[in-house]
């Protein structure tokens, strides 16, 4: 489980040590993230910003995402992998971003929050100008036993089942939940062998250009994500909101905003960077 005390210590160190530093061939990086509803900061409880096709004022209940396969590029445009530091928020090449604090309507979460990635890039010098990342847990880690997995892959609220895997993102408001996860894996008759050859991965990869790691953050805008969705109603005979199923019409506008094809779970024809809900904003906003 996440240990708040360790998280606070890490945050203090990061603030004191600066956002990045260089050695001869190894650059340390800190990538900051934010979340909100338009210009309103993401927080648990009722929000005043009207969102969706019916301009509904949502009550936020959860906002957490797994991020993986982070890469950066400098002025030469060549992307290099970020080797994430290993801590309670980061395991192997996966990190958890957590924008809920367990208060008010977020009682399913906990007090610890995380809005940064930290890591190192080999054979890199100069300034980072582009960031690329995937939302979701890679297939190689997607079917771990949560009860024995390392943090942050041990969180009950971020898993479906062994066969179903993790919730790549959990973005819940009262009465309308978005659980992005891989669907379509099947078990054999003995419930032992998992076949994901025909799955819908539902892992969008985004490339954001023009970032200054010292002054900017990557921003997830819930209002933009559900701009064309009606979060005040739900398709009959389906779970509330979008559970990533291709047959759920509530998912259609959400997947379009994410740059995903609803049928295949792959990037849309225009690419995942056709997404409309993730952008670069100043760090102080």
Image: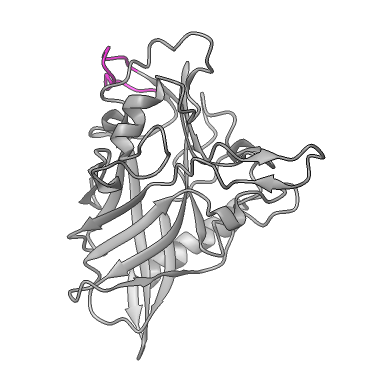
> Which residue range is magenta in the image?
46-57
Residue that protrudes farthest toward the right in the picture: 190
For the point 40% across and 53% down, the residue is 134
From the top left corner, tell me how far across and down residue 95 is, in percent.
50, 56
Q: Position of residue 94 (x, y in %)?
A: 51, 58
- Tell which of 9 and 174 is nearer to you: 174
Quarter of the image for residue 261 reads: top left
- The main secondary structure of the magenta stretch is loop
Above or below 76: residue 61: above
State the residue at coordinates (40%, 20%): 250
The number of discs equals: 0
Give the colour scheme of this rendering.
one colour
Left/right of residue 218 with respect to residue 150 in the rendered view: left
Q: Please indicate, yes or no, whether residue 29 appears anywhere in the rendered image.
A: yes
What's the residue at 47%, 15% (across, down)? 175
Q: Residue furthest bottom?
A: 24
Q: Reply above or below: 223 against 26.
A: above
User: Camera-side residue: 209 or 267?
Assistant: 267
Residue 89 belongs to the span the image colors magenta: no
Q: Nearer the viewer, residue 219 or 17?
A: 219
Q: Does residue 72 lie above or below 89 as drawn?
A: below
Q: Position of residue 28 (x, y in %)?
A: 38, 75
Instruction: Specify the quadrant that holds the C terminus.
Output: top left
Q: Please state the horizontal and vertical placement of residue 171, each as a whole percent of the image.
A: 45, 32
Front position in the image: 246 or 73: 246
Q: Is residue 174 visible?
A: no
Q: Is 49 included in the stretch rendered in magenta?
A: yes
């Amino acid at each position: 489980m996440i240990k708040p005390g360790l998280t606070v210590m890490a945050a203090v160190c990061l603030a004191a040590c600066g956002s990045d530093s260089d050695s001869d061939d190894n650059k340390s990086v800190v990538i900051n993230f934010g979340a909100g509803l338009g210009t309103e900061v993401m927080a648990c409880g009722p929000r005043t910003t009207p969102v969706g096709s019916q301009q509904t004022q949502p009550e936020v209940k959860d906002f957490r995402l797994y991020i993986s396969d982070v890469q950066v590029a400098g002025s030469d445009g060549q992307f290099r992998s970020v080797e994430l530091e290993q801590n309670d928020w980061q395991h192997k090449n996966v990190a958890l971003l957590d924008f809920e604090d367990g208060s008010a309507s977020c009682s399913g979460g906990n007090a610890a929050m995380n809005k940064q990635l930290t890591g190192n890039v080999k054979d890199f010098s100069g300034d980072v100008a582009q960031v690329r990342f995937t939302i979701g847990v890679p297939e190689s880690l997607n079917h771990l036993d949560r009860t024995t997995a390392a943090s942050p892959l041990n969180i009950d609220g971020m898993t479906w089942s062994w066969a179903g895997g993790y919730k790549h993102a959990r973005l819940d408001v009262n009465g309308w939940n978005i659980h992005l996860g891989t669907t379509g894996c099947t078990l054999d008759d003995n419930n032992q062998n998992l076949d994901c050859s025909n799955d819908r991965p539902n892992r969008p990869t985004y490339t954001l250009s023009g970032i200054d790691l010292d002054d900017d953050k990557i921003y997830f805008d819930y209002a933009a994500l559900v701009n064309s969705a009606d979060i005040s109603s739900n398709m009959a005979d389906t779970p509330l909101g979008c559970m990533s199923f291709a047959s759920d019409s509530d998912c259609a506008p959400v997947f379009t905003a994410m740059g995903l094809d609803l049928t295949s779970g792959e990037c849309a024809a225009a690419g995942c960077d056709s997404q409309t809900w993730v952008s670069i904003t100043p760090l102080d906003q």
